[in-house]
Amino acid sequence: MVTLPQWVHLLPENLPNCDISITGDSCYQNFQTFSLECSDSVYSIAWNFGDPSSGANNTSTAINPTHEFSDLASYQITAIVEFNCHKDTITQNISLLDCPEPLTPTLPYEFPNVITPNSDGANDFFAIENLPENTEVIILNRWGNVVFSSTNYQNNCNGEDNSGTTLLDGVYTYKYTTEAGTIGHGFVHLVR
């Protein structure tokens, strides 16, 4: 009797390309939604959110699960993906912020919700109107990684990170802290 292997082992160049996508605002107080973008059809997914304190909610077999993290921390998200004839494990790290303030600032500051840094002279910068001097501004990508920060923000974020690398289109979370101690956060959509 011939026994066939349960899974076919593919060479690395033949494996499907998969990425975990996270939709949310990087605030640990809110739910994050996860999805998988793959170049091959997915048969099933087993998610682990790296959050054992959340008990039974730490895992899911839903295609697009939602998870509310139990604490302010960094987590490694793992998706064990079963395709037609093989399995793969995909991971993604996420760092969450403490965002106790409302999403819409009730202060005299005016935050843009979209910037288009295409050098046309309109909306090229993340320009916050009436922002006090010595206000710290931090901008994070969808994984919670800091891509821009300034301790005295001068409305100079033009769609590049602190090293001058062009940021990808997408939704970014910003957090600000004024010298007087006012803290807030929100979202800005970068479109070129």
Image (cartoon, rainbow, N blue to C red):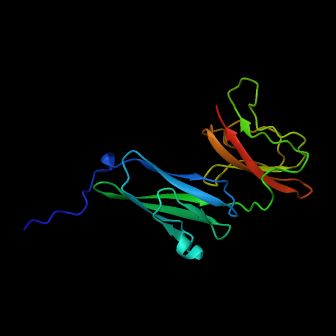
Q: Nearer the viewer, residue 126 or 22?
A: 22
**From the viewer's perspective, is residue 120 above or below residue 99?**
above
Q: Residue furthest front?
A: 62
Name the residue located 70 percent from the left edge and 60 percent from the top edge.
97
Q: Quadrant of the C terminus?
A: top right
Residue 96 point in image, percent of width and height: 66, 61
* Closer-to-camera residue (186/147): 186
Against 1, residue 186 (above or below) is above
Give the residue at x 82% y 44%: 153
Q: Is residue 179 visible in this depiction of the protein?
A: yes
Tell me which corner region of the image, top left, top right, bottom left or bottom right, holds residue 32: bottom right
Give coordinates of residue 13: x percent, y percent: 32, 46
The x, y position of residue 63, in whole percent, is 47, 57
What residue is drawn where x is 82% and y is 51%? 136
In this picture, residue 36 sits left or right of residue 2: right
Is the N terminus in the top left, top right, bottom left or bottom right quadrant? Answer: bottom left
Query: Which is nearer the eye, 10 or 107?
Result: 107
Q: In the displayed structure, does residue 63 sit left or right of residue 172? A: left
In this rendering, the count of numbered labels is 0
Quarter of image, res 89: bottom left
- Residues 148 and 73: in front is 73
Q: Is residue 175 visible?
A: no
